[in-house]
Amino acid sequence: EPAADELVSGRITRVAPSAELTQRLGTAATPLQQAEILGEAGIWYDTVTALAAVHSEQPVAWTTLLRSVGLDEIVDAPVLDCCDASRTSSLAE
C-alpha cells in the first residue's frame, strides 16, 4: 500500500564558512572538536557526518547529539555507511 508509506523530506543549503569558522576548524585537534564547532555554527549536516565518522570511538558524543535534538528513539540504531559496497552486497543476498 504505497499511500501508507511514510515520507520524509529535507533541504540542504550550502553555506560558505566565515573566516572565523575556517580558523576555528583549522585549530581543532580532533573530529569531535570539529563536530562541536560545526554544531555551534548550526552546520548540522557536517556535524552529523563528523560525529558518525567517530561514532564507535565516541558513542557518548553521538548519543548526546541525538538526544539534544529529540531523537532518543534512534540512539541505539546502528550507524551504517550508505555507500559501503560490502553492506550493499550483503543486503542483496
Image: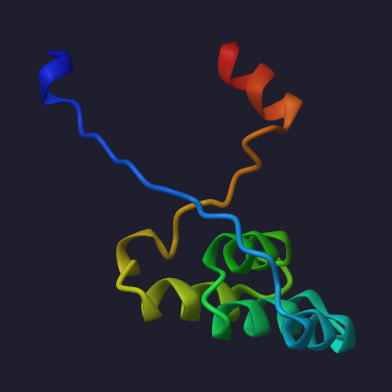
Colour scheme: rainbow
At 24% from the left and 35% from the top, the residue drawn is 7
Q: Residue at x 53, y 67 (%)?
A: 44
Image location (x, y in percent) of residue 74: 38, 59
Which x, y percent locates residue 23? 84, 86
Locate residue 16 relative to residue 27 in the image: left or right: left
- To which quarter of the image does residue 82 belong? top right
Q: Position of residue 69 (x, y in %)?
A: 36, 74
Quadrant in which the C terminus appears: top right
User: Is 55 placed above or below 85 here?
Assistant: below
19 left or right of 55 in image: right
Please report the residue visible at 74 percent of the width from the left and 72 percent of the height from the top.
Answer: 57
Question: Could you tell me how many numbered marks the image carries?
Answer: 0
State left or right for residue 7 relative to residue 80: left
For the N terminus, give its image quadrant: top left
Residue at 17%, 15% (x, y): give it.
Answer: 2
- Where residue 52 sits, quadrant-wise, is bottom right
Q: Does 10 appear above or below 33?
A: above
